[in-house]
Each structure stands twice: as C-alpha cells, then as structure tokens.
Amino acid sequence: MGHPVTDALLELVLTEWGPGAVLCWDADGTLIGSASGFQRMLGLDEGKDADVEAIWSMIRERCTPDPGDLASAFVDISDREVALIDREPLGPRQLRLSLRHLASPGDLTVLLARDLTERQGSRDGRVENELLSAERERQERALRDSEQRARALLEAMPDLMFRLDRQGVYLDYKAAREDLAVQHLDSLIGLRVRALTPAPFADLIEAKIAETLQTGRLQRFEFRLEIPERGMRDWEARMVPSGLNEVTATVRDVTEQKADAARLHRLSQVVEQSSDAILLTDARFRIDYLNPAFETLFGWTLDELRGSLPDVLNAEPDAETHQQSIYSRLRAGEPVCAEVLNRRKDGSLFHCRYWASPLHDDQGAVVGYMGSQQDISARVQAQQALSASETRYRLLAEHSSDLISKHSSDGTFLYVSPSCRTLLGYAPEELVGRSPYDLFHEDDLDAIRASHETVLSSKSVDRVEYRMRRHNGDWVWLETNSHLVDDPEDAQGYVILAQSRDVTEAHQLRRAMVQSQKMEAIGRLTGGIAHDFNNILGSVLGFAELARLRNAGIDTKLDGYLEQIDIAGKRARNLVRQLLVFSRGESTVAAHPVALAPVVKEILKMLRPMLPANLGVRFEGDSEALIVKIAPLHLQQMLLNLVLNARDAMPGGGDIAVLLRETLAGGECAVSRECFNGRWIELSVTDQGKGIPDEHRELLFQPFFTTKGVGEGSGMGLAVIAGLMRSYRGHILLSSRVGEGSHFRLLLPPAEATAQ
C-alpha cells in the first residue's frame, strides 16, 4: 500500500522509533500510506477508504473510555496511551500512539501505534499467543525488509546524512571518509561536532539543531567547510527532527553548482551589460529575451515582442525572403553573419551587422537561437560618403586629360586612368601590374629614383620631369607630381598617387628658346669676330696687292710669297663669309622658284669627281613638280656639305642615298628645337657611316665643331646649312645610330610660283 518512496520513509520511522504500526498523511490530510498492519492492529476495516478525520473518529470509537478529540490532544503532546474495547479475534488492547512530523521530503505526519497489552490468563491463550507470535514474526520480517530497502535507498542517495542529538553528538552517519572534515578517525559516532570542527561551524550546527527541535520544522541553510586535499567547499544542508532529542541532516556538496551558478551569473551579466543588442528565441524562432542594449537600440521592450518572430525588425526590400533564408540556414545548424537594414519601433531605419547561431543543450539538441546586432549606420554612412567621393574623384580621373595613377611602394602600377590611351597609347589594363621603370628613358632614371625616394621618406609632394616611351616607341615628356597617401586596403598601409601631364610641347618650346638664345649668342659672337677679322683681312690683302704692284716682277721669289698671302687671304675671306651666313643668314635676294630635281642631279654630277671610286651615290626623285624658292648656289652649298660629310663618315666606301620628295612631316627641329608640322619638300642624305653619338648632337650645328682631325675640316659645313635653313624658314630632322649611319632631312617650304 502506498508509494515506494513513502514506504521507505515509513519503514525508516519504524527502524528509528521501534516496531509498530504506521499511518502517514500529508499537510492536506490526504492519506499517503500505512505499514505493518495499522488497520488490523486497531481493528479498523482495511478495505475501506478513509481520510484522516475518519481515521481519528474510528480510533475514538474503538477506545474505552472515550479519549476525546485525539487530534487536538496531540497538539501539546507527542505520545498517548489508549485502551481498545474487546473485539474478536484480538480482544481488548492497550496501545501507545506516537505522532511525528517529517519535514523532508514534503511536509508529512506519521502516527505510530505500539501494542502494550499483557496477555495473562487469556480465555484462549494458546490461540492468542499463536496469533500474536505470527503477527510479531510478520512484523519483524516486514521490518527487516523495510529496513533493508531503506538502507539501500540511503546508500543510493548522493547526499551525506547525519543523526545528531541535542548536544551535537553524532549518533549515526552516512558519508565517505574523503567527504569528511576529519579523516583520521575510523568513526564519528559518539563524538561532538564541536570537538572535530572549527568553532564557527560548530556554533552554526548547534544553533540549527536547537532551532529544528524547537520548531519541529525543516531547516535549510548553507555553509563553507574546508575538506582535506579538496580545499574549501560549499555545502547545502537540510535538517529535520527525527526524535524527541535528535535531528537528521542531509548535506550536499554544492561547490560545483555554485561555481556553475556564478559562471552563469557572470554570463548573464555580460549579456545584460553588453553594448551589442542581443535577443534569444525558442526553437521556433519566437522571441523570449531581449537585453537592455536591444531595447535601447530598437525601442521595443521584451513584453512588446515576447512570442513574436524577428521578422518585424527586418526592413530589407525582400524582407520575407531574406528572413526565411536566415531561418533555413539556422535550422541547418549554420551560423549566420550579414549586414541588414533594420526597423526601429518608431519606424526609422538603420543599418545593422548581426550574428545568429543555434543554442544547444547538453545532449546537442537545438533549444533556441541567439542573435547579436551592432548599429553600423555611422560606418555605412561613412562608406557611402566615401563611395560618393570616390565616384566623383574617379569621374574626374577618368575624364581628365592628365594621367592619374596609383602605385605601390616599389612603383608598380595599381591603377591607371583611361587618359593613358591618349597619352601613352596603352590600355589601362596593359599597365596595371607593370613597373613604370620599364618605360622610362635611361637618361632620366637617376632623377626619377631621387624623386621616388623623396616621396617615400618625406611624404611630401615632389615634382619631376622625365621621358616615357609610348606604345609606338616614341618618347613623350611628362611632368609628374606624386605624394604618399594612407590606404588601409593596401598591405603596407599606403600607396603613391601621381598626376602626370604631357609637357612635350612645353619642353620642346623651352629647348627651342634655349637653342635660339644659344645660337643667337653664338651668332653675335661669330658675327662680331667675322666683322673685325674681315677688316683686318682687308688690310692684309690690300697691302699684299700694293706690294705685288710695287715689286712689278723684279723679285720673282717675293711674287711667290705675295701670291700665297693672297690665296690664304681669300680662303680666310670665304670662312668669314660662312661665319656671317651662320650668324645672320644669307641674303635670299637671288632666290627664285627652282625645280629641284634637275639642279640636284647637276650638283651630284659635279660632285662625282670629288668622291672615291668605292663610294656610290644613289638619287631618287625625278619629279619636275618639286619646286622651292631658293638660290641655286645655296642649294648647291647645302647638298655639297652633306655629301662631303657623308663621304668622310665612310672611309671604307659604301652608298650615299639622296632623296628628293614632297612629304608631310613634323617633329623637333635639330637646329632650333622648335616643334613643327606640315607639308614640305624634303631633300635628304643618308649614309652608312659611323653614326653620331648622342652627346654630339647638341653641338653639330655650332660653328667650328668637328670630329675630324686637325686640318681635315673647319667645322663650318653644318653651321652654314643651319644658317641657310633659317633664312629659308626650313627645318632639319636628324636620325642617327652609332655604327649604323646618319640620316639628314632638309625640309623646305614648297613654292607656288612657276619654276625658272
């Protein structure tokens, strides 16, 4: 009869209070169970259901004399003896009734009945003794069984158990040695708590024993006690009265539980105090927790959102699809991290970065989900502003005629604006990843490297001019301003920004101006010298002529000397005339439209005897329509100088090519350094000689510059050509490579008049 746990508790009462019949009920008066034939001992009907009040009434009916209200009587006493009327088969009985309250487990009341009857001279003593003996044997057997079950139950319980008397003396206990504060003793029974433990702990236990016995109620309390080799431990105790002057206490080690609770509390504090907005949902995504930061950020309280789906927060254009995608990924056990547009309670929108992941119990089952969100509106707005700024600057860069480029620290192109197509002839993708040093003119590398180092070391803007090779091989002059800027996306944290402008024309104009000033200065010098020298030379030749007339052939030897003076003087006068041609140009009064082809052929025919047999002259251009306004003598003088220079450049022989044609040409004039373009009549001379080194090109057309030996040339040939070309508003183009020969192109403006 009754629940197994209740049976065990009732049997524990029998074990501790002695043999008897037991009846138990809870605080509501509901019968829980009975043991050892309670109804049979009192002569009650065992098959009849009854509540506590009915039991008290039936006991009163069986008593003689009438004991009165037994339930009220037990308020002041715990034991009472009653006499039962004679009823077969047991006859009259003398019983002791004991009432006990058990606070654990639950709030239970136990009524114990013990038989005190002496059976002397019974009418049927033998039968009665047999019945009593059988009943006693049955009760003892039941007692042993219940005691065994109670012991097994106690052993299976993890809690420590102690029985203590009013003075704190151990009456019994269930505890392993390693759980005790005193481990060197074989037994605690008979020893006082105060003799074995620190005074504060003993004070606590004695006070709790007194309070338990006084109130008769369950006492719950916690304490800390150090256990050898385990350190200070936290304990939870429950103490109930188990007799008139004794208590029973169950003690449980809650150190790990308190540590877990402390960790849980810390975690809850972290969540509560986190600046991130955190929400928790159940396994169906229904909101059941919001931290304060969430309520502050979104404006909703937990009461307003409890049980709702987080969909109400999503303000994306495709919010439903977006939210279902999140749910699907979370159901699959996948953490989700993304940026999303959210909605506050007041309807305002803001950008948020969120993380969401499943929550699992100890068995790994999903019990809910957690989401953490951060307001990134400021960052998104900054990114949008930056993106708009980048778009504006990219538009400027992509539509600027200047070349805008971004470089790594070693100069490698990281970005090139589209203007590189016009400026350099390359597509942007052809330059990205390349080093610009592959395209720089070797003469400018030192200046470029110095500027590069300045930018890296000082982070200041630096300007440099240099030549860069275009896709077609031509050189373009660039002026570049570059500086260092921070770039968090770059591995080194910075890049070089450069703005490059085509200054080829300006550079050529500067060179032309410098060349013009230089040639003007040289012209003034040579003109002044020639003028003075011409005056001196006139006196020398005049006096030589007077001396010849005075001698009149008398002294033939003297006549020979005077003849040599005259020859040298005339040669000097011709040199002076060439200097004057260079410095002031030649008079073009004798110039008239001339068909060049016949004149050129005639000049070449005249030059043939002056050339060695191993040197050939090839002429191209028989068109009679090529007409230039020029004095034939000047044309002869220029062609003669070019052909003779070509002859001297090829001492081992070869071919000289003379070309006459009409052409469209442009470039930088080798004499004036001016840039020009247009339609010209070209007279060019090409040799296969030694070529002209770069360092000589700036000096070629200056008076007296020559690479020939002493006495082999005056150095005035090209200077005269330069002077004559200036007079006829023409230009000279020169191309030459050492070891491959030279190509001189004389470009003269065509004449419209009829040739004479």
Image (tube, grey):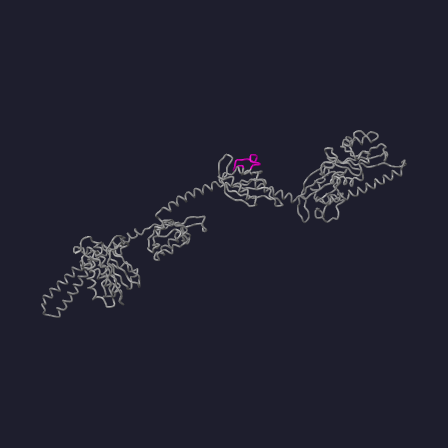
Residue 390 is left or right of residue 474, and the answer is: right
Which image quarter holds the N terminus? top right
> Based on the displayed image, in which of its 4 quarters is residue 577 positioned?
bottom left
* Residue 445 x/y as whole percent: 36, 56
Say if 507 sits above or below 223 in the image.
below
* Residue 293 x/y as whole percent: 54, 38
Whether residue 570 is visible to the viewer of this picture, yes or no, is yes
Viewer-proximal residue among 290 and 190: 290
Whether residue 459 is visible to the viewer of this picture, yes or no, is no
Q: What's the residue at 18%, 53% (across, down)? A: 753
Q: What's the residue at 45%, 43% (across, down)? A: 383
* Residue 246 x/y as whole percent: 76, 39
Residue 401 is left or right of residue 174, and the answer is: left
Q: What's the residue at 43%, 43% (across, down)? A: 387
> Based on the displayed image, in which of its 4 quarters is residue 120 positioned?
top right
> Based on the displayed image, in which of its 4 quarters is residue 681 positioned?
bottom left
Viewer-proximal residue among 714 and 249: 714
Residue 756 is left or right of residue 699, and the answer is: left
Which image quarter holds the C terminus? bottom left
The magenta stretch spans residue 552: no
The magenta stretch spans residue 301: yes
Viewer-proximal residue among 9 and 643: 643
Say if 63 sits above or below 694 in the image.
above
* Residue 594 x/y as whole percent: 18, 56
Q: Tell me which segment is drawn in magenta.
A: 295-308
Q: How many marks?
A: 0
